[in-house]
Amino acid sequence: MSSLRTARRAARGWIGIALAAMVMVVAAGFGAHAATAHNDAGTKPGADGSTSSSNQAAAQAAADRILTTFQAPPGSRRTAERPDPVPADLAGPPVQEMDGTQARAVGWYSAATTPAEALSWVAAHPPSGAELTGRGSASVGPDFLIFTCPAPSPGSLTVTTASDAQGRTVIRLDAAVDWTPVRSPDSLVPAKAVTAVEVGTVDLARSDQSDQSDQSDQSDQSDQPDQAKLPNQSKLPDQSKLPAQPARSARPLPEAETRTLRSTDPTLVGKVVGLINALPVPTTGLHSCPMDTGTRVTILLVGYGKLDVNPAGCGRIHLTPFAAGQHPQDFDGRQSRALVDQVYALFGVTWQP
């Protein structure tokens, strides 16, 4: 039976929540909008005929539409341009995830009431179908409300109020809609090329397999299994012989995870390949990251390649094909935990990190 090679990636990650980003503002009718393009955005169509460019354009149209659902307080006046000078608290959105695959639109109003009164009225009169899901306090910045907007324009609308130098109330609107980059057909794993699937988990906190450098992240040729010698590859480390780390829990990984699970069932293999082919490509920008626990998962696609997955921290999904001439691929790491859960579920195991 062929065996898995241990995923060996150093834990790293940092928190990017609530950092402000500089955005380019372009005048556009009712308001202004800014969208950050994905580095793979282009015109090459995916399997369904869509492209990254068309998805981005659709998201931008949806963000522009969300602005039109705003219900302004009585006596308010919509302005076509950003105020000059703009109140310092309204120079940018109060909270931003800095996602590179997010279309954004900005709108402006002037109100006849105080900032607090205007925001109170907006909270009681949300955009049609929208739900108030967050608010901010002036103790850490300007007062603001966050609404979650439903289809056909799923996204969010942030409403922020502040006073300008003349004491007049200014309302800033920030609409945001995520869009999905398209994977080209040649990035998909051919189901017929995979004859079996193996999966196993290792905890780097108790593993002696950790890299001494970040070179393993690059998946160089020395780290790629020789397909002809696949059954002789190194095995998962024996958890009972690995040194314990005082900073980690002493609880061992479940036995069903540390041993290699293998299936040649065409239905199961096809489902695993389907999960991989449904993974989105990585997005640019900053994302919030939970603590990295040091757990790594390797999914071996016998006959094709292997996936090294970090289901913790910032997440990582790296595919290394075995065949010469085929390039490694990275997928959106935020999907790593869901992928691991789903693959193990196909083997009848509830994965526990």
Image: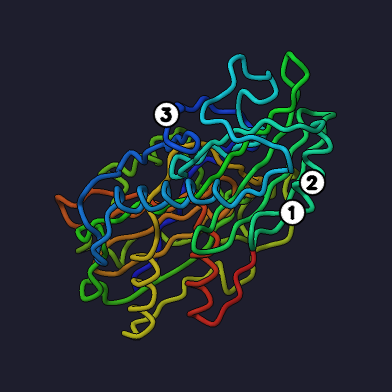
Q: Quadrant of residue 217?
A: top left
Q: Which residue is mark 1?
A: 125
**Residue 319, position in %: x, y?**
34, 55
How far, Cα to Cα, is label 2 from label 1?
6 Å
Q: Tell me the quarter of the image containing the C terminus.
A: bottom right
- Residue placed most toward the observer, 232 or 205: 205
Q: Which mark is residue 26?
A: 3
In this orientation, which residue lies closer to the viewer: 98 or 324? 98
**Residue position marked by numbered label 2 in the rendering:** 121
Foreground of the two, 101 or 274:
101
Find out whether the residues at labels 3 and 2 contact each other: C-beta distance under 8 Å. Answer: no
Tell me the CA gap for discs 3 and 2: 29 Å
Residue located 65% across and 42% down the image: 158
Image x and y of residue 187, in percent? 25, 57
Q: Amino acid at mark 3?
A: Val
Position of residue 150 relative to residue 35, above or below, is below
